[in-house]
Amino acid sequence: MTDTLRIGCAVDAFALDDPAYRDAIARLFTVVTAENAMKFLLLRPDRDTYDFANADRIMEFAEAEGKAVRGHTLAWHSQLSEWVADAPAEERAGILRDHIDTVVGRYRGRIEQWDVVNEALDDDAQPRESPWFEAMGIDYIADAFRWAHEADPSARLFLNDYNVEDLCPKSDAYYELAKQLLANGVPLHGFGIQGHRIVGDPPTSMRENLQRFADLGLEVALTEVDVRMPVTEVEHASDVQLAAQAADYRTMIEAARAVPACTSFVLWGLSDAHSWIPETFAGFGAAHVFDEALRPKPAFEAVFSDTVGPSYAKEPVLR
Ligand code: 9MR
């Protein structure tokens, strides 16, 4: 069986200090994304400072271990330093351009895919209000892609968003946006579907959705996959929920595998021990493929059972 789909994970720069974590990421995955370290807020505490320490740690780890890197992310409304919104609107295009030149330029030739614009549309499929949109209008999207392409002509440049797994009004709006950008000669190379889901509600038309973007000539990817479930402090995930979760992971990875233009399937976190979910969605958790004790869950089997290649150990115990 040939398998072009690479399995990846979002990586926390500080967690790399934990040998078990570092080893698991190195052993299980062929692509990594910085969960936070390459975001504007983390790189740009103030206007005159670029702090690359944590982003560099992830790059160095990835290069030492031979992993591809997805860069995340250049233009986003969230985790954006407050000083951007405080800057006069007429200066913001310059700020974004300088940011993209500097960050993409630093890692030129070393980052395979960049999420250039993240979450550009809101839940009504309208352009999301952000300091970039406010100052530059919708053209900030095309500009960001052009600047990123100039800074690294070899990087594959992606739009990326959530709630776009299926054929739906929001993914329709992305399809139209992608067509328009391509018609205008904008260097857009890929569409990233994040894949944050709630257990028991799997996507039903993800393959068709991925395929229509592929038919535009784009690469596609699942970029931030997790499947959360209701949990309480006393009541942990039940076997029934864990089986349902595994089925949902399987639905997504099977759709990704069915589309040859889908190049990566990236998990948004390794284990339930370190997860963004509980602090964002009260009463939810257990979203990842390893549990809090770093034991593989049924979802691990769903993701890895059909995965081939020497880097995938059959023995998934982490400690
Ligand atoms: O996992 C990230 C978490 O640690 C941050 O606190 C959060 C801030 O918004 O961002 C999380 O990652 C997000 C990603 O960058 C973009 N898509 C949604 C992800 C989950 O919020």
Image: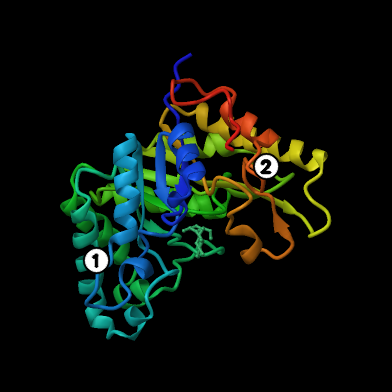
Query: CB of residue at label 1: within 8 Å of ligand 1?
Result: no
Residue 305 location (% of width, % of height): 59, 24
Residue under label 2: 202
| Disc sitting over residue 133 in the figure | none
Q: Is residue 2 visible?
A: yes
Residue 119: image quadrant is bottom left
Q: Is mark 2 within 8 Å of ligand 1?
A: no
**Mark 2 surroundings within 10 Å by alpha-carbon count, few (fewer than 14), some (14 through 19), many (20 or more):** many
Q: Is residue 137 above or below residue 149?
A: below
Residue at image point 23% right, 49% down: 185
Instruction: Compute the Cα span from label 1 to label 2.
Output: 37 Å
Q: Secondary structure at mark 1?
A: helix
Residue 200, how many percent across, how many down?
A: 74, 44
What residue is drawn where x is 78% and y is 42%?
A: 241
Q: Which quarter of the image is occupied by the C terminus?
A: top right
| Residue 99: image tag | 1
**Is 21 above or below relative to 217?**
below
Q: Nearer the viewer, residue 317 or 266?
A: 317
Check disc 2 and report its element: helix, strand or loop. Answer: loop
Which residue occupies the foreground of this view, 141 or 67?
Answer: 67
